[in-house]
Image (cartoon, grey):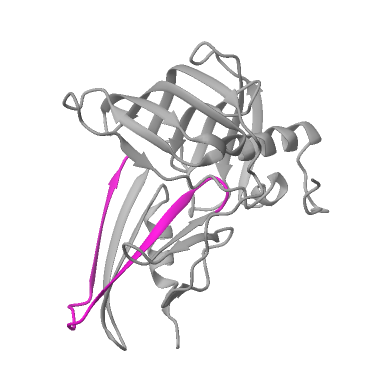
């Protein structure tokens, strides 16, 4: 299906196709493999088994105790943008890729145009477009995190790219999102949460209501490319704790917390 036309899009058709294939890859494949995750000078191997059509994945760290249950990782790979829209926020380039996990790849790099997002160097599976190696870096090139499949098996599944994560009525909403970010899903259980993405970067905004008045304040930490930022504020019905978790810079997490609004019922 043809996407929206961007008259000022300066990407070649080949580069557009490569980006769009990557954006939709998680909705078209299932895969099983072992990857190496490196961040904060720490390395670990992780077994990954995806669901069909982008329905999330189960992760198991190989250095966990025997019998430890896998970690369910919900999918945030919902296609909300296309290549030319992404190019408003990233500068893209392509090159030949390495062999990763025994599969041929094509390299795609994305350099951020602003400080609200990180940069990426991705080696994409030549057949399916799935990222097999991803290096996440700051705008000035400092590596934050890298993952790379040591082995992987990929199979095609029915395309679910037109599906969307659920949107649920909530007492909270997001307004004035950072440029390029869109709300792609929301839920109310086990606590209100809203997922936002610019197509590459994604974050979840969790909201916890407390009855008593709380001391306003904020705190944040980084682990590799993942930020966790929490702010306490007081609303008309008591205190609110807003927590933002995602692969975004701290400044973007603060802007997402700024965007939280209490719905007027």
Frontmost residue, 97 versus 74 = 74
* Residue at 37 percent of width and 34 percent of height: 58
Q: Position of residue 55 (x, y in %)?
A: 50, 42
**Range of magenta residues:** 198-224
Say whether residue 143 is visible. Answer: no
Frontmost residue, 22 versus 255 = 22
* Residue at 57 percent of width and 38 percent of height: 53
Frontmost residue, 19 versus 64 = 64
Rendering quarter of residue 143: top left
- Give the left or right position of residue 94, taking residue 173 as reference: right
Q: Position of residue 2 (x, y in %)?
A: 81, 47
Q: Position of residue 85 (x, y in %)?
A: 69, 52
Q: Is residue 191 above or below residue 162?
A: below
Rendering quarter of residue 240: bottom left
Frontmost residue, 43 versus 57 = 57
Q: Position of residue 3 (x, y in %)?
A: 77, 50
Question: Is residue 221 one of those drawn in magenta?
Answer: yes
Q: Is residue 65 above or below residue 111?
A: above
Say whether residue 220 is visible. Answer: yes
Question: Is residue 120 one of those drawn in magenta?
Answer: no
* Residue at 53 percent of width and 31 percent of height: 121
Q: How many marks?
A: 0
* Residue at 79 percent of width and 36 percent of height: 12
- Give the left or right position of residue 135, taking residue 160 as reference: left
Specify the quadrant that holds the N terminus. Answer: top right
- Give the left or right position of residue 170, taking residue 46 as reference: right
Q: Is residue 209 above or below residue 111?
A: below
Specify the quadrant that holds the C terminus. Answer: bottom left
């Amino acid at each position: 299906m043809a996407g929206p036309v961007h008259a000022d899009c300066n990407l070649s058709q080949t580069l557009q196709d490569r980006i769009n294939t990557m954006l939709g890859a998680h909705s078209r494949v299932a895969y099983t493999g072992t990857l190496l995750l490196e961040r904060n000078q720490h390395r670990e191997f992780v077994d990954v088994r995806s669901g069909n059509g982008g329905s999330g994945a189960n992760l198991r760290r190989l250095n966990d105790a025997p019998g430890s249950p896998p970690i369910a990782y919900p999918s945030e790979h919902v296609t909300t943008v296309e290549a030319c829209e992404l190019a408003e926020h990233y500068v893209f380039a392509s090159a030949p890729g390495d062999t990763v996990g025994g599969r041929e790849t094509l390299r795609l790099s994305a350099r951020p145009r602003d400080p609200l997002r990180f940069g990426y160097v991705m080696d994409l599976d030549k057949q399916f477009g799935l990222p097999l190696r991803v290096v996440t870096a700051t705008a000035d090139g400092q590596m934050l995190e890298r993952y790379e499949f040591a082995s992987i098996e990929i199979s095609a599944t029915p395309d679910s790219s037109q599906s969307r994560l659920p949107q649920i009525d909530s007492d909270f909403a997001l307004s004035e999102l950072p440029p390029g970010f869109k709300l792609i899903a929301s839920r109310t259980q086990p606590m209100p949460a809203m997922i936002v993405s610019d197509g590459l970067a994604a974050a979840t905004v969790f909201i916890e209501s407390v009855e008593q008045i709380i001391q306003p304040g904020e705190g944040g930490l980084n682990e590799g490319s993942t930020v966790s930022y929490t702010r306490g504020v007081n609303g008309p019905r008591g205190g609110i704790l807003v927590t933002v978790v995602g692969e975004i810079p701290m400044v973007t997490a603060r802007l997402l917390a700024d965007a939280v609004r209490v719905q007027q019922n």
